[in-house]
Image (cartoon, rainbow, N blue to C red):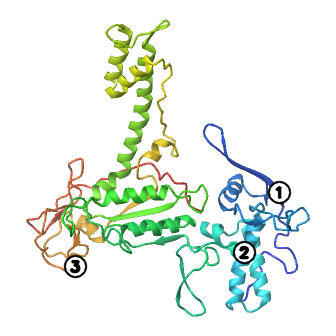
Amino acid sequence: MRISRRFTTEDQSPYAGIEFVERNSEIRNPDGTTVFRQEGIAVPAEWSSVAVDILAQKYFRKSGVPQLGPDGRPLLDGDGQPVLGGERDARQVFHRMAGCWTQWGEKYGYFDGPADARAFYEEICHMLARQVAAPNSPQWFNTGLHHAYNLSGPAQGHYYVDPDTGALTRATSAYERPQPSACFIQSVSDDLVNDGGIMDLWTREARIFKYGSGSGTNFSILRGENEPLSGGGKSSGLMSFLKIGDRAAGAIKSGGTTRRAAKMVCLDLDHPDIMQFIRWKVVEEQKVAALVAGSRLGKRRLQAVLLACRIGDRIEADPKQNPSLRAAMREARAAFVPEVYVQKTLQLAAEGVTELVFPEYDTDWDSEAYLTVSGQNSNNSVRVPNSFFEVLDRGGERTARSPRRSPPRRCGTRLPMQPGPAPTPACSTTRPSTSGTPVLRTDASTPQIRVESIIFWTTRPATSPPST
C-alpha cells in the first residue's frame, strides 16, 4: 500500500499542533468513597472529561509498563531493574496500537516501502489524538502490549491462523497474538458438558469477556422446560441455563477493568419458552421492586417492634404484658413481615439489642438489589422469521397451501422445511402467555396458524454501560 499523508508532515512529530495537558480522573461510589483516582494524566487538551475518564479507567494498562523519568529515560530501581507501573500518557497508548499495526504491516509486506510505513504510523497517532478515528475497545485493551512492553503471560486458549503457513495454530502466550475483535457470534449445542455444549459456552464466553470483547448466541437449539431428555426425565429448560450464563457474565470484569461484559442473547419466536424469555427482565424488575419496598418496610416495622419492647429503663418483650409491643407486632404482620423475623426481633430485644441490623436496598443499577436478580448482564432479542410477517399480511392466517419457510418448533425438534400441510404434531403446540393470551398459536388439529395478538414489552435499558 502507498500511504498519503492527510494530517501530518514528514520529519515533524505526529502531534505537531496538538496541545497536551495533565488531567485527573476519578470514580466515586454513591456514598462518596473513592473507587479509582489517577492524577497527572497527559492527554490532548481538547479531550472531554468523559474521554479522559474512559482512557484512564478502562484503556490504560495498569501494570507491567516501564516507567519513565522527567527526562524521558526509563526509571531503574536499586537493583538496576526497570520500575514498572501503569500507562499515564495517552501517547503511550497511541504508540503501542499504531506501532503494533505498523510492525505487522511491515512484517507481512503491506506497505510499498519504509516511507509508507512511517506515514501510516504517524497518521494513525495523529488521528487517535484528534479523535478523527478510533478502534473498538478490545484494540485499546490488548493491542500492542507485547509489541511495546514485551508483556507476556500463559496462553488463554486462543487460536489464530498463522500467516506464514495458513494453519490454525494455538497461541502460546496471552498478548503476542491479542484478541482485538469487538464481538464474537458463538454457537451452542443442546448438550450439557461436551465440547460446544452449554457449559463449554460459558468457558468460551469468559475468555471473550476477559479481553473486552462481546459474545452473542442464538439459544433456540436448546430444548424447553419439561421437554424429555434422552436418559429419561425432563429438561430444566432454557431459562435455567440462561440464568447461569447471565451470572457468569456479571462476575467478569470485561477487559480486566470496571467495564461490564457485553453479552447478547437471541431466541427464535417459535421456541417453547419464548414467553418466559420475553418476560424475563420484566419479572426480574418486579423482584427488585419487591426487594426495595420490602426491605425498607420490613426494617421500619421490625425496628418499631424492637423499640416497643423498651418501657423506660425496662425491657418487656412479652406482648401479653406490653400493649405498645402488641400494636407494633400487629402493624408488622399487617405489612406481611414474616413471623420468623418478628420473633427473632423479640429475642434480640430480650438480649438488650437496641438497633436492628436489617439491610435496605435501592434501585441503583449497580446496587445489591440488581446484583441479586438475574437477567442484568445481557441484551436480549427475539428473532422473528419472515413467515410470521407473511401471516400478518394475510390477515393472521396461514393456509394449508402456504409454504412453511420457518416451521414451528415441537418438543425441542425442527419440522422439515417443506410446503403443504403441516405434519401431525407429536405434542401440544399451544403456548399461552403468562397472561393467558396466546401470542402465536398452532392449532394441532389443522395446519393453520392464527395470530391472536401481538404484545410488546418495554423494559428499562440494559444495565451495562454501552461498549465503545
The residue positioned 35% from the left and 46% from the top of the image is 283
Kindly identify the amino acid type of the residue bearing the numbered disc 1: Val
Q: Nearer the viewer, mark 1 or mark 2?
A: 2
Horizontal side of residue 228 vs 176, given as left or right: left
Considering only vertical position in the picture, is 350 above or below 34?
Answer: above
Q: Which amino acid is tagged 2? A: Asn
Tally of numbered tags: 3
Q: Residue at x 74, y 81 (%)?
A: 120
Mark positioned earlier in the residue sequence (1 or 2): 1
The answer to which of 54 and 112 lies nearer the viewer is 54
Q: Residues within 10 Å of mark 2 (few under 14, many from 20)?
A: few
Instruction: Say whether disc 3 or disc 1 marks the residue closer to the N-terminus.
Output: 1
In the rendered structure, find residue 150 and report the number of the disc placed on it. 2
Nearest the viewer among 6 and 261 is 261
Task: Give the residue displayed 36% in from the left and 8% down from the top.
Answer: 322
Can residue 124 be seen in the rendering of this structure?
Answer: no
Residue 391, by quadrant, is bottom left
Which amino acid type corresponds to the residue marked 3 in the rendered image?
Answer: Met
Marks 3 and 1: CB-CB under 8 Å? no
Mark 2 vs mark 3: in front: 2
Q: Which residue is mark 1?
A: 21
Camera-nearest residue between 271 and 35: 35
Residue ID for mark 3: 417
